[in-house]
C-alpha cells in the first residue's frame, strides 16, 4: 500500500485532528486513508490519489491553524470539497482577509468562496443583494462590513431594518408598547451588533442617532444619505415596500439587502418584493447579486444537511407540479373522475 510522510508540528496537531481525533477520523473516512501521527510527522497510507489529496488537505489546514484559526468540522468538510475540486489554494487566499475583530478578539473573515464573493460585491457595488439559506452569514458579514465602514468614516451612520411580519402571531397580543412589540423582530440585528461592537459602544452611538435599528415601515418618507443600510429578511417585503426602501437611498450610501427566498412569512397569495427586485434590477450597474448556497453554510454541519434536504424536497415538489397531466401533483384523470361524481 502506498504511503507518504507529511510534517505536522505537534502544536497544531490537536487543532487540526480535533478533540478525541474527531477530525482525523472524518478525514480517514472521507479520503479512504489511514493517518498515523508520530513525533511531529504523520504517515499517510492509502491509494496514491487519496494520499495526495490528504497531503493537500493537511497543508491547507496547517496554514489555517498557523494563522490562528480554530479548525472546526465545517472547515474540514468545506476544505475536503475544495481539494476534490482542486481549489485548495482559493481557501488559503480567502482566509487572508480579516474584516475586523469582535469584542472578544475573534477575527471576522469570509470562510467560503461564496462568502468572499459576497464581501467583494459589497465593496464594489452601491447595492448588493445577498440571497441564500440560513447559516450562510448573510446578515453577520453585512453587519461586519457596516461597522468597518463606520469605524473608517466611509459612512457617518448605520441603519438596520427588517419588515415586522407577523409570522403566525399577532403583534397586538404581545405585551408592552410598540417598541417592545417590534424588538423581537430586530433581535438578531442587536445580537450581531453587541458581539462585534459591544453593548456600550452600540448604546452610545445609538443615543447619538449614529446607529439606528428600526422596522422597515419607519423608512417611508426619508432620504438616507452617507449611511450604510442593511435590509434584513427582505423575502418578507412586498413589492411596494421594496420599491419604497430602494428609493430612500441617498448620496454616499451603501446598501445590503439580505434574504432567503425559501422562508417567506407573507400570505400565500402575496408576491415577495425580493423576488420582484431580482427580476427587475438584475441588469442594472452598481447593483450586485450574490447567490449563496448550502455549501456556504457555516453553522453546525447538521444545518447544512437540513438545508440540502429541504432543497431536494422542494425540487421534487416543483417537479411534481410541473409534470404534464397533473394538477398540483394529483393525476388529472382522477380529478376529472372525482368531479364527475
Image (cartoon, rainbow, N blue to C red):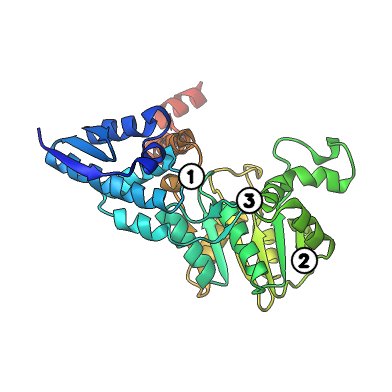
Q: Residues within 10 Å of mark 2 (few under 14, many from 20)?
A: some
Q: Is residue 262 above or below residue 301?
A: below
Q: Is residue 9 left or right of residue 104?
A: left
Instruction: Name the residue nearer the viewer: 328 or 121.
Output: 121
For mark 1, give the secondary structure. loop
Q: Is residue 47 above or below residue 150?
A: above
The numbered mark at residue 210 is 2
Q: Is residue 197 left or right of residue 289?
A: right
Residue on which the image places disc 3: 233
State the CA–CA distance, disc 3 to disc 1: 18 Å
Q: Is residue 212 left or right of residue 272?
A: right
Q: Is residue 168 above or below residue 182?
A: above
Percent from the top left, x then y, of residue 224?
Answer: 73, 71
Q: Are marks 1 and 2 in contact (CB under 8 Å)?
A: no
Q: Residues within 10 Å of mark 1 (few under 14, many from 20)?
A: many
The numbered mark at residue 325 is none
State the CA–CA distance, disc 3 to disc 2: 22 Å
Residue on which the image places disc 1: 298
Which of disc 1 and disc 3 is earlier in sequence?
3
For mark 2, give the secondary structure. loop
Percent from the top left, x then y, of residue 207?
Answer: 84, 61
Regarding residue 321, the answer to whether it shows in the image is no
Which of disc 2 and disc 1 is earlier in sequence?
2
Which of disc 2 and disc 3 is earlier in sequence?
2
Which residue is at 54% across, 50% downward?
137
Amino acid at each position: 500500500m502506498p504511503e507518504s510522510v507529511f510534517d505536522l508540528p505537534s502544536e497544531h496537531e490537536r487543532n487540526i485532528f480535533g478533540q478525541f481525533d474527531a477530525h482525523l477520523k472524518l478525514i480517514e473516512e472521507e479520503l479512504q486513508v489511514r493517518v498515523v501521527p508520530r513525533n511531529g510527522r504523520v504517515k499517510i497510507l492509502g491509494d496514491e490519489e487519496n494520499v495526495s489529496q490528504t497531503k493537500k488537505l493537511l497543508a491547507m489546514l496547517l496554514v489555517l491553524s498557523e494563522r490562528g484559526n480554530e479548525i472546526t468540522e465545517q472547515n474540514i468538510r468545506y476544505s475536503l470539497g475544495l481539494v476534490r475540486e482542486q481549489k485548495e489554494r482559493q481557501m488559503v487566499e480567502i482566509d487572508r482577509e480579516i474584516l475586523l475583530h469582535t469584542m472578544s478578539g475573534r477575527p471576522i473573515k469570509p470562510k467560503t468562496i461564496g462568502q468572499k464573493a459576497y464581501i467583494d460585491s459589497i465593496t464594489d457595488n452601491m447595492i448588493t443583494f445577498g440571497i441564500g439559506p440560513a447559516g450562510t452569514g448573510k446578515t453577520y458579514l453585512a453587519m461586519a462590513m457596516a461597522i468597518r465602514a463606520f469605524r473608517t468614516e466611509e459612512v457617518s451612520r448605520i441603519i438596520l431594518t427588517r419588515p415586522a411580519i407577523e409570522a403566525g402571531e399577532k403583534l397586538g397580543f404581545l405585551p408592552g408598547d410598540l417598541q417592545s412589540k417590534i424588538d423581537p423582530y430586530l433581535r438578531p440585528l442587536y445580537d450581531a451588533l453587541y458581539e462585534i461592537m459591544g453593548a456600550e459602544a452600540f448604546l452610545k452611538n445609538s443615543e447619538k442617532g449614529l446607529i439606528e435599528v428600526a422596522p422597515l415601515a419607519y423608512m417611508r418618507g426619508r432620504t438616507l444619505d452617507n449611511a450604510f443600510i442593511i435590509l434584513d429578511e427582505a423575502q418578507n417585503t412586498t413589492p411596494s415596500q421594496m420599491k419604497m426602501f430602494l428609493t430612500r437611498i441617498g448620496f454616499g450610501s451603501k446598501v445590503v439587502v439580505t434574504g432567503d427566498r425559501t422562508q417567506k412569512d407573507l400570505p400565500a397569495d402575496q408576491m415577495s418584493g425580493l423576488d420582484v427586485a431580482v427580476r427587475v434590477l438584475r441588469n442594472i450597474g452598481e447593483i450586485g447579486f450574490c447567490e449563496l448556497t448550502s455549501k456556504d453554510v457555516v453553522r453546525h454541519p447538521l444545518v447544512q444537511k437540513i438545508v440540502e434536504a429541504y432543497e431536494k424536497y422542494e425540487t421534487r415538489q416543483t417537479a411534481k407540479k410541473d409534470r404534464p397531466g397533473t394538477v398540483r401533483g394529483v393525476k388529472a384523470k382522477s380529478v376529472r373522475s372525482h368531479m364527475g361524481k
